[in-house]
Amino acid sequence: MSAPVVVAEIVRSGFVEGHHYGSVVALDAAGEVEWAVGMVDAPILPRSCNKPIQALAMVRAGLDLPPELLALACASHSGEPFHLDGVRRILAGAGLDESALQTPLDYPLDDSARDAVIRDGGAKTSLQMNCSGKHAAMLATCVLNGWSIDDYLDPKHPLQVAIAETFAELTGEPVDVVAVDGCGAPLLSTSLIGLARAFRALAVAAAGPERQIAEAIRAHPAFVSGTTRDELALLTAIPGAIGKAGAESCYVVALPDGRAFALKTDDGAPRVRPVLMAAALERSGVLDLDGVDGVAVRRTGELTLLGGGKPVGEIRACY
């Protein structure tokens, strides 16, 4: 088994002052490994990258949401007003309100949205936590199936069992680790290859729940992240792409032609995540495809280091 390798350099005033270690895998259109660096075949915890797969299990269990709310079920949302209104809509459709959510209390993920809450004297709430869309969808799925809602986060709950089965099916790998995610939900392990394989299955689906998930993400990428996020910029620049970022610098993107990319850094630094994805897409020639805004994709991967308030360096990928 391989180990994480240097995937990015931290360059200041022409001097390499540090490195990020990690792993990246690219699948070709047939779903085979085109290239890889680092440790791509061992279990990782993909964090919020798992959300679209979790949402797929819910749709298979009967969850029926309009596309923008289905996208929100896949989201690590920014906590902007339209996100919070969407979560309320999911809950109301199930006859519930935000008191049913078991997400931790939090401020919005987006800086401006958070600052607005604080200026208005607001407090942390479960609704504002970035995983509340997923949790609302979980609750709605439970109500639909007559499952209990008090213990919907228990790994033995019928909902979580269904999610685990769907997850293993799409990744093509057994779930070796069941951890607890930041939001309290069960967190299932897979390899970077398995994660890329699962998103590929969504991206190439011609019909069914898989297609529903992919089309919701394509049509409403701002509901999956937020209006100021690099994920939105990337998906907007690549027609038909779907993707999801997660904590600990996880990221997965899949294209409708079957290509898919997944990555993770060892230090979990969020700043390098978009740098690495932009470089991976460029290495595989995605930026040269018809309709792709290569300039916009490259822009998502630009990370400038400042000195005295002026640009003096960058973080650059090493593959």
Image (tube, grey):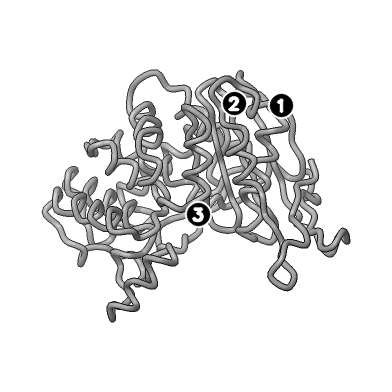
Q: Residue furthest bottom?
A: 121
In the rendered structure, which amino acid carries the disc numbered 1?
A: Glu
The local secondary structure at tag 1 comes to strand
Residue at left offset 23%, top offset 39%: 65
Where is mark 1, residue-wise? 34
Which of the 4 image quadrants contains residue 131? bottom left
* Residue at mark 3 to residue at mark 2: CA–CA distance: 28 Å
* In contact (CB < 8 Å): disc 1 and disc 2: yes
The number of callouts visible is 3
Which of the 4 image quadrants contains residue 208? top left
Which of the 4 image quadrants contains residue 25? top right
Side of 58 relative to 155 (left or right): left
Residue at left offset 63%, top offset 51%: 273
Q: Position of residue 67 (x, y in %)?
A: 28, 36
* In contact (CB < 8 Å): disc 3 and disc 2: no
* Residue at mark 1 to residue at mark 2: CA–CA distance: 9 Å
Where is mark 3, residue-wise? 178
Side of 34 relative to 51 (left or right): right
In the rendered structure, which amino acid carries the disc numbered 2?
A: Arg
Where is mark 2, residue-wise? 259
Residue at left offset 73%, top offset 45%: 39
Mark 1 vs 3, N-terminal side: 1
- Give the quarter of the figure containing the N terminus: top right
Mark 1 vs 2, N-terminal side: 1
